[in-house]
Amino acid sequence: MGDPTRRPTSLVFLVALVVTISGCIGTSWGSGGSHGSVSSTTSSHGAGTSTGSITSSSSVVMLGKVSFKAVLKVLHGSTVVSRYSYSGTVDYTSKVASVSLGVIHHPGNRRLTGNWHSKQIKIENGTVRVFNAPPASWSTLSGNVSVKTEESIFYGNPYYTLVRILGNTGSKSGNFSIELSPSETLRLLKPMMWGRSPPEVSLHGWVVLENGGITSVLLEGENGDTRYIFKMEVFG
């Protein structure tokens, strides 16, 4: 990164990412968790308008294999100071995953160099491989670090986290308003922020469901003069 404090070694950087992500995951897939306040405002299928609280009696449809792209922008005023991304495909049935994480600070400033970092993580046949850039190299993880990384990818990614937060919608379709508590915001954003702790802020906005499954999400929140915009698309 442009700031010397943003240049940890690859090993320290990876361990920090694993710790911060794994700290946000539940004990197991389908375990309990808190649920944001969700209400229906419009229906994308013309079924009319309904309102109500979403409870934890059953879950939003959880896809066995999902592809998604999530982006978090951090703005001071109208200037984007950081852009984080988390995208890829996760197959819960075969335990195979390929995800990419990226961060760029002050993306509008072309004079800065070294202000970006990207990471690709591949999980297949119980093997966890990581590509870091810089320094543009692959490494194979082992032991406890491998286990924690695998758990964080399957159970700490933005898609899984939102499924757990949203709770019960049955087979509903439409656009639903949602507000996440600061603790839920922490669970959602921390895995994307490369070891940086999200602020104490609530996110509010919209989630679009098709037959009970998430298709897109738009959330915003403010903390002083800093604004956070989170977007996610789910491709199934």
Image (cartoon, rainbow, N blue to C red):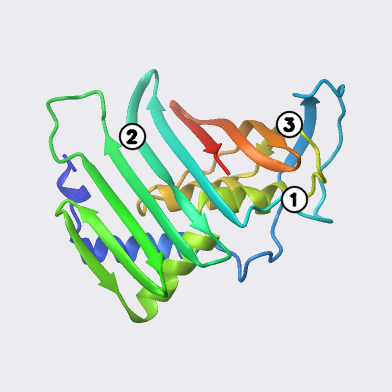
Q: Is residue 3 visible in this depiction of the protein?
A: yes
- Could you tell me which quadrant the N terminus lies in? top left
> Where does residue 82 sit, x and y in percent of width and height?
33, 34
| Position of residue 198 in the picture relative to residue 33 (left or right) | left
Q: CA distance from mark 1 to mark 3?
A: 13 Å
Name the residue at 80% across, 54% down.
56
Q: Is residue 157 above or below residue 29?
A: above
**Secondary structure state at the residue bearing disc 2:** strand
Q: Which residue is mark 2?
A: 82
Name the residue at 72% across, 50% down.
61
Q: Is residue 220 above or below residue 7?
A: above
> Where does residue 108 sit, x and y in percent of width and height?
25, 23
Q: Nearer the viewer, mark 1 or mark 2?
A: 1
Name the residue at 75% across, 29% down.
174
> Where does residue 40 sit, x and y in percent of width and height?
79, 30
Q: Which residue is mark 3?
A: 176
Q: CA distance from mark 1 to mark 2?
A: 30 Å
Q: Nearer the viewer, residue 24 or 236?
A: 236
Which amino acid does the dot numbered 1 rest on? Gly
User: Mark 1 Cα within 10 Å, few/some/many (few <14, many 20+)?
Assistant: many
- Could you tell me which quadrant the C terminus lies in? top right
Looking at the image, which residue sits at the far top? 78
Name the residue at 44% across, 59% down.
97
| Position of residue 67 in the picture relative to residue 196 (left or right) | right
Q: Nearer the viewer, residue 161 or 43?
A: 43
Q: Which residue is mark 1?
A: 167
Say whether disc 1 or disc 3 marks the residue closer to the N-terminus. Answer: 1
**Secondary structure state at the residue bearing disc 3:** strand
Q: Is residue 24 visible in this depiction of the protein?
A: no
Which amino acid does the dot numbered 2 rest on? Ser
